[in-house]
Image (cartoon, rainbow, N blue to C red):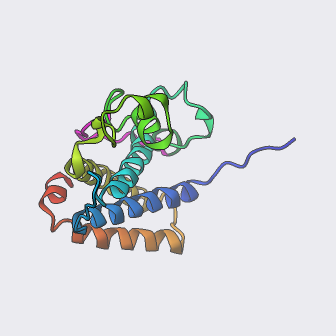
């Protein structure tokens, strides 16, 4: 009998911290990038927007739950703040994270992660117009998700819920340093609460 080992909460937190840090780095690059535009209408922000959008979704699902969790493939293998930490986090007013929004699992799967029929045959231009909220909506959502994430992590660590390993502590220190830099940008700063 092959029993799957359940990850410890400190192992889960390490992954959450990794996603927080990489999203913060991506937003920093978005804010600092001097867009390069070639002959096409696509500029150099596209890969950063795509990465940030996926990171937002990962953290959103962890903190606020999966849409249609019972239907999600391998739902029993998916960790969350509610299920694994018995913590309910107040959802900030995120843009486009509802079931039909641009940050929904369906939209991300359909337009960013897979070559679906709709992605290939129906859009008038790439990326799909649903994602044209531009970097401002991505930065705002990132700021709100990261603020919620930081409060969650601080509460877990402060409450002596667990000890973070050295690598996780380094992720957190780096994350806090990047957030200090990001607060210099008005769009990020206004949404980081």
Per the rendered image, the range of residues in magenta is 85-97
**In this view, 180 is above or below 145:** below
Position in image of residue 3 (x %, y %): 79, 43
**In this view, 80 is above or below 163:** above
Q: Residue 112 magenta-drawn?
A: no
Q: Nearer the viewer, residue 151 or 127?
A: 127
Residue 158 in sight from this viewpoint: no
**Lateral position of residue 141 relative to residue 158, left or right:** left
How many numbered marks, from 0 up? 0
Residue 88 in sight from this viewpoint: yes
Position in image of residue 26 (x %, y %): 34, 62
**Residue at 54 percent of width and 54 percent of height:** 12
Q: Quadrant of the N terminus?
A: top right
- Res. 165 image quadrant: bottom right
**Residue at 42 percent of width and 34 percent of height:** 119
Name the chief secondary structure element in magenta: loop
Q: Residue 93 magenta-drawn?
A: yes
**Residue at 42 percent of width and 30 percent of height:** 121
**Lateral position of residue 130 relative to residue 12, left or right:** left
Position in image of residue 16 (x %, y %): 46, 56
- Res. 156 image quadrant: bottom left
């Amino acid at each position: 009998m092959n029993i799957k080992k359940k990850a410890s909460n400190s192992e889960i937190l390490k992954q959450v911290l990794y996603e927080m840090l990489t999203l913060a780095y991506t937003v920093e690059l978005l804010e600092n990038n001097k867009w390069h535009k070639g002959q096409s209408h696509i500029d150099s922000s596209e890969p950063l927007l795509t990465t940030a959008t996926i990171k937002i979704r990962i953290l959103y699902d962890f903190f606020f739950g999966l849409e249609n969790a019972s239907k999600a493939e391998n739902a029993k293998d998916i960790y969350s703040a509610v299920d694994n930490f018995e913590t309910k986090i107040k959802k900030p007013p995120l843009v486009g994270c509802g079931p039909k929004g641009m940050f929904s699992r369906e939209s991300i799967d359909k337009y960013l992660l897979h070559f679906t029929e709709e992605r290939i045959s129906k859009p008038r231009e790439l990326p799909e117009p649903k994602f044209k909220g531009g970097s401002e909506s991505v930065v705002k959502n990132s700021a709100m998700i990261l603020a919620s994430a930081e409060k969650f992590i601080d509460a877990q660590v402060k409450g002596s819920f667990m000890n973070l390993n050295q690598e996780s502590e380094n992720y957190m220190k780096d994350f806090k340093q990047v957030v200090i830099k990001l607060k210099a940008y008005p769009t990020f700063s206004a949404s980081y609460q």
